[in-house]
Image (cartoon, helix red, strand yellow):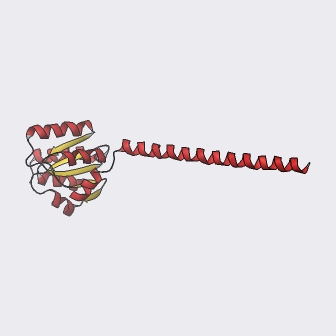
Amino acid sequence: MPSQKKVTYVEKIQKQMEQGKAFYFTDFTGLSVKDLESLRRTLKKNNGQYLVIKNTLGLIAMKNLGYDEMTLKQLFVGPTGIAIAFDDPIVLAKTIAEAGNLKIKGGIIEGVFCDQDEVIRFSKIPSRDVLYAQVVGSLNILGNFVGVLEALLRNLMSTINALKEKKDKEEK
C-alpha cells in the first residue's frame, strides 16, 4: 500500500504534467548540480520545466495521464529527468540536445513516442520564429514574382496597343 506522501507527490507531478505538450526523458548522470540548475533556469525561461523523479512514481503519473505503460517502461530506466514543454516543444528539444552531459533517452511529443534519434532530429528543426520569418520571406519573394509578372503583362499590353495604333494609322 503506497504511503499518502507518495500518492500526494504523484498527484502533484501528474497535475504539472497535464499541461505538457512534450516530454523529453533524459539521464542526468554526470551533470553537476550547478549545470542542472542552469538547465532548469533555461527551460523555465522557455516555458518549460525539468523534473527529477523516481522511476516508479513517474511511471505511475504518466500512466495515469493515459500514456502506454510498455513504452514508458523503456524510458524510466536508470536516473531519469523529464523536461516538460508547456509551449514550443522545438525550443526545449534544442535546449536538451545542446546541454552537455545530458543523455536523451526519448520523448513523447504531442502524444507520439519518439526515440533518442527522433528527438535529436526534432531539435534540429528551426524554431517557430525562424519558420515564420521563412514563410514571410517566401511571401515576399512571391510578391516580387507577381510584380514581375504584372510588369511583363503591362509591357505586352503596351506593345499590343502600339501595334494596333500603328496598324490603324497604316489603314488610314
User: Along the horizontal axis of the image, is 138 left or right of 115?
Assistant: right
User: Along the horizontal axis of the image, is 150 left or right of 60?
Assistant: right
Question: Seen from this angle, which residue lies furthest front?
Answer: 170
Q: Give percent across and percent down for residue 167.
A: 84, 51
Q: Give percent across and percent down for residue 112.
A: 29, 58
Question: Seen from this angle, which residue lies furthest right?
Answer: 172
User: Along the horizontal axis of the image, is 21 left or right of 39?
Assistant: right
Q: Residue at x 19, y 59 (%)?
A: 72
Name above or below for residue 45 compared with residue 55.
above
Pick whichever, 160 or 42, lies toward us.
160
Task: Evaluate whether residue 144 shows in this view.
Answer: yes
Pick whichever, 106 or 164, lies toward us.
164
Pick whichever, 61 or 74, lies toward us.
74
Q: Residue at x 77, y 46 (%)?
A: 162
Q: Residue at x 53, y 47 (%)?
A: 142
Instruction: Locate the N terminus by quadrant.
Output: bottom left
Q: Give percent across and percent down for residue 118.
A: 26, 58
Q: Give percent across and percent down for residue 136.
A: 46, 43
Q: Residue at x 70, y 49 (%)?
A: 156
User: Along the horizontal axis of the image, is 9 left or right of 67?
Assistant: left
